[in-house]
Amino acid sequence: RTREADKGARLVYDHNQRLLSCTSVPHNCGTTVSLMHMFATLPVRHREFVKNIKREYKHLVRVLQQYAIIQPHIRFVCHNWLKAGKQTVLNTKKEASLLENICCIFGTKVVKGIVPFHCTCAAAGFIVDGYVSKPERSCGRGASDMQFLYINRRPVDIPNLSRAVNQTFRQYNTGGQMPIFFLNIDTQTNKYDINVTPDKRKVFLHDEHALVDFVKEQ
């Protein structure tokens, strides 16, 4: 339901993305998405999905986390319906800061182990804002599952930049751990190209080397 509407609209689609029905229903402002009977019409894909359900679930939660962290004006709520009942996967606040979203999703322990990061690369036209791990052994992790990069608040993968942050962190953390980081790169849209892969996660930065070298020096 939009703010202007008195009621919400319930849209039901089939597995072929065809609209089956549209009815008016009471609803708070916002959008609720329910996924049921996934891949029911594709037996082979369904078996593969069930076989790797834990891995698929982990990927799904990470995607939700990526968007929930960086959107300060949108509240994200996700429930997983189990046989034992409803399990809340994430629940952020509306009009929350980046740090508040991180706290809602990952907890106060993670927040206590990170510090603000800000740098401006005027020559290349990049502004990098966010949070990174403190250079202490107790603040790192054994995996890279809490490393998030964004361009203009869009989740992206920039392997060279991630590698640079990891290498710099290990210079101060001798325990072989990986840093936690949440970094958003603000820049003009003509500075990068998102049409590299179908999912638009990999991007081509025109001045990537300048950005990586600049972040390393901070």
Image: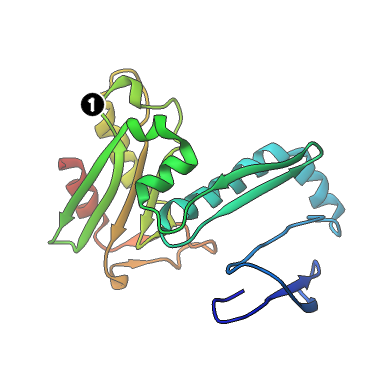
Left or right: 191 with respect to 10? left
Residue 83 drawn at (x, y percent): 82, 39
Residue at 29%, 48% in the rendered image: 130
Please identify the quarter of the rendering in which residue 14 is found. bottom right
Residue at 67%, 62% in the rendered image: 33
- Crowding near the residue tagged with mark 1, few <14, some 14–19, many ≥20 C-alpha atoms within 10 Å: few
In this rendering, is residue 27 above or below 213? below
Q: Secondary structure at mark 1?
A: loop
Residue at 33%, 31% in the rendered image: 112
Residue at 43%, 62% in the rendered image: 73
In this rendering, is residue 114 above or below 100? above
Is any part of residue 145 visible from this angle? no
Q: According to the image, label 1 marks what residue?
A: 171
Q: What amino acid is at disc 1? A: Gln
Residue 113 drawn at (x, y percent): 33, 30
| Of the pair 16 and 79, the residue shown nearer to us | 79
Left or right: 141 with respect to 197? left
Quadrant the N terminus occupies: bottom right
Please identify the quarter of the rendering in which residue 108 is found. top left
